[in-house]
Image (cartoon, rainbow, N blue to C red):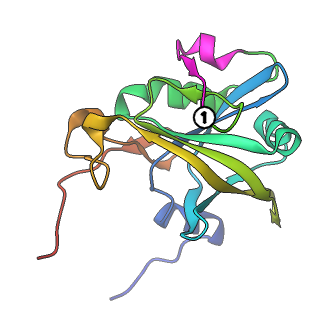
Amino acid sequence: MIFDELAPSRANRLINHGPVVLISCRDGDRTNIMTAAWAMPASHTPPMLAVAIGPSRFTHDLIINSNEFVVNVPGADLLDAVWYCGTKHGHELDKFAECNLSAQNGKEVAAPLIGEAIGAIECRLSSHPTAGDHTIMVGEVVAAWAKAELFETRLLVEKSAAQTLHHLGGPHFCRPGAVLAKK
């Protein structure tokens, strides 16, 4: 097979179509929501995840200062909010109000959960190494939530309300297709 060469700066477009998440955070009376496509599980024991955030983002310093954040999993019905939270800066905006999203109290962290999301993962910041032009926020999972009708032993993406968004680059997103199971 012959491949067309891609610029190294575009290599992420081959693998970054995992679910888009909304990172919510709070430091004192300042809250924010940021869209992130670069998130992943990082450890089973203890349960940890990682999300890449640029240092110029408002969310970056809120997380560093508060040592906590929430990874919210939006459904495809929140595409407008996902786009807004990924293209507007939170320094002077209340993204919860602008996107008509409800801030819910978590169990272990002060950062708000997004009530309209499919699920939410509360995290305490474990480390934050620098990787090029981003900081990798590694969070230990201290609580996790999912809408009961959309999660059993896995996210039920075959249900339309549980279809996650996957970023393909720029303004392009997709949703999961058929669920395949190896027998």
Q: Taking the image as drawn, is residue 135 in sight?
A: no
Q: Does the magenta run of residues contain 25?
A: no
Question: Where's residue 124, x and y in %?
Answer: 72, 49
Q: In this image, 107 relative to 19: left or right?
A: right
Q: Which residues are magenta?
A: 94-107
- In the picture, the quarter occupied by the C terminus is bottom left
Residue for point 51% across, 59% down: 16
Q: Residue at x 59, y 55 (%)?
A: 38
Above or below, comparing residue 22 to residue 45 in the picture: above
Total number of numbered discs in the rendering:
1
- Residue 142 place in picture, x, y as percent: 62, 49
> Given the image, on which type of amino acid does mark 1 rest?
Lys
Examine the image and state in which quarter residue 3 appears.
bottom left
Q: Is residue 103 magenta?
A: yes
The local crowd at label 1, few if under 14, some if 14 to 19, many if 20 or more residues have their Cα within 10 Å, is: some
Residue 164: image x %, image y %?
A: 37, 42
Q: In terms of depth relative to the viewer, which is nearer, 170 or 39?
A: 39
* Horizontal and vertical percent position of residue 140: 66, 57
- Name the residue furthest left: 183
Residue at the extreme front of the image, as rendered: 107
Q: Is residue 86 visible?
A: yes
Instruction: From the viewer's side, name the closer residue of 76 and 127.
Output: 127
Image height check: is 130 above or below 153? below
The image shows residue 56, relative to residue 87, as above or below, that is below
The quarter of the picture where residue 134 lies is bottom right
Residue that badge 1 annotates: 107
